[in-house]
Amino acid sequence: MLLSLSNVPRDYAWGSPTLLADLEGRSPAGGPEAEVWFGDHPGDPSDVQGGGTLDAVTDGTLPYLLKLLAAASPLSIQVHPTIDQARAGWARESSLDADDPTRNYRDDNHKPELIVALSERFESLSGLRPVPDTLRLLAALGGSAGVTELTTRLTASGDVLRATIGWLLSGEAQAEVDDVVASVRATAQSDAGEWATTLRAVSAIADTYPGDPGVVVALLMNHVVLRRGEAVFLRAGLLHAYISGLGVEIMAASDNVLRGGLTPKRIDVPELLSILDTTTGEVPVLRPSTAGAVTEYEVPVTDFALKRVALTGGRVDVGVSGPTMVLVTAGHVEVGGTTGDARSVPVGTVAFATADEVQLTLSGEGEAFVASPGPSSSEA
């Protein structure tokens, strides 16, 4: 059975006033439009054409949440727990009310996620840069007191990134934070060589979040620019933040977020540090296929799988297993199922196939993303 799904954009302050409207070919709503959720998450289940919401169909069992995400300014720096950490945190906080401001864990699930760029440029901070590289960046900032102190902490012994992030977020490093940010601003306006793009990005973040210690945390992270169709997978424990752009995001069905800066919301520094993975290195960029219509973004989890289908006037058959969504992001696309049901899917909406469907046929000209539960294998 096929169902048509839609939802109302969420108006978070970091959302873009135009990106979603431009995608869907409509007039802007007049305010920020940040995310459109497609799923059965109790926070905002999708609307089913004809009446009702998707959770009434699935009974809240969908293992993934699919989103359109449109950022005009940076989201908070954040990290998500492993499934064992989430279960332990959920159990510890079982006595707290659901809306208690000190609660960190909203459920007992992990939240790995994948973001695919829809805009021609999508900027993010993804993972921690190797310390030797960050030391070279700091050397380009000059020798101010704040930069010197940050360099000293990063050249100490032990888990220097965990200790340094804890210091930056402790509230005791504001003078050094302000000094480092001033050095970033000054260097970004000059010839910063290999670090020019990164420093301009961090300087712009500082304009949005003046005085926020997360700006210096951002300086420790990889600045990643995705082109249309490219993606990054964000595993549990990986520090990340989206800066700007339009994308398709898919994640495990969870709302567990520990924040690490660029936000007025509460930051639980000890809990953040307890789940933070300080392994450094570049986060691999997953690129669309240049041969064939279908690109599969391989991820090491069983909660979700995502494929990109580029249609050029013919038809593409996609085998499916489990409840599946087809999100159309460009052109004119029709989706048909094995039961003979077929429907045209407007851009920015979803055709949802119930678990009895085993193959979907996509036809027309345009682009669609096919989301489903992942294969049954152990999490990597």
Image: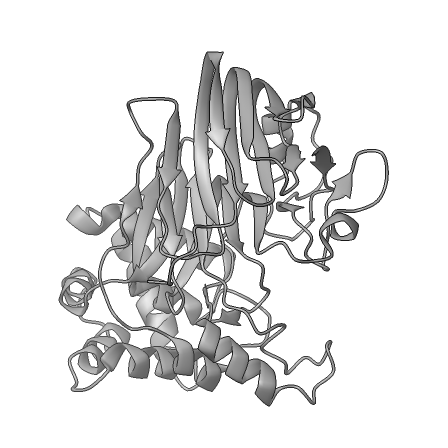
At x 24% / y 62%, what residue is drawn? 129
Q: Is residue 163 positioned above or below 196 on the image?
A: below
Q: Nearer the viewer, residue 376 or 374?
A: 376
Q: Describe residue 124's horizontal placement relative to residue 131 as left or right.
A: right
Rendering quarter of residue 237:
bottom left
Residue 102 in view: yes
Q: 131 or 303: which is nearer to us?
A: 303
Residue 345, horizontal then vertical, whole percent: 65, 24
Q: Residue 266, percent across and down?
A: 58, 76
- x%, y% of residue 344? 67, 20
Which residue is rendered at x = 31% and y = 63% of the image? 219
The residue at the point 65 percent across, 57 percent down is 61
> In x, y percent, where is residue 303?
49, 56
- Left or right, 300 with reference to 337: left
Query: Would residue 348 be found to the left or right of residue 272 on screen?
Result: right
Kindly identify the residue that appears in the image at 22 percent across and 61 percent down. 281
- Residue, far top: 313
Q: Quick one: 207 or 241, which is closer to the camera?
A: 241
Task: Please indicate, yes or no, whether residue 19 appears anywhere in the rendered image.
Answer: no
Q: Relative to 360, does residue 152 appear above or below in the rendering?
A: below
Q: Is residue 269 left or right of residue 329?
A: left
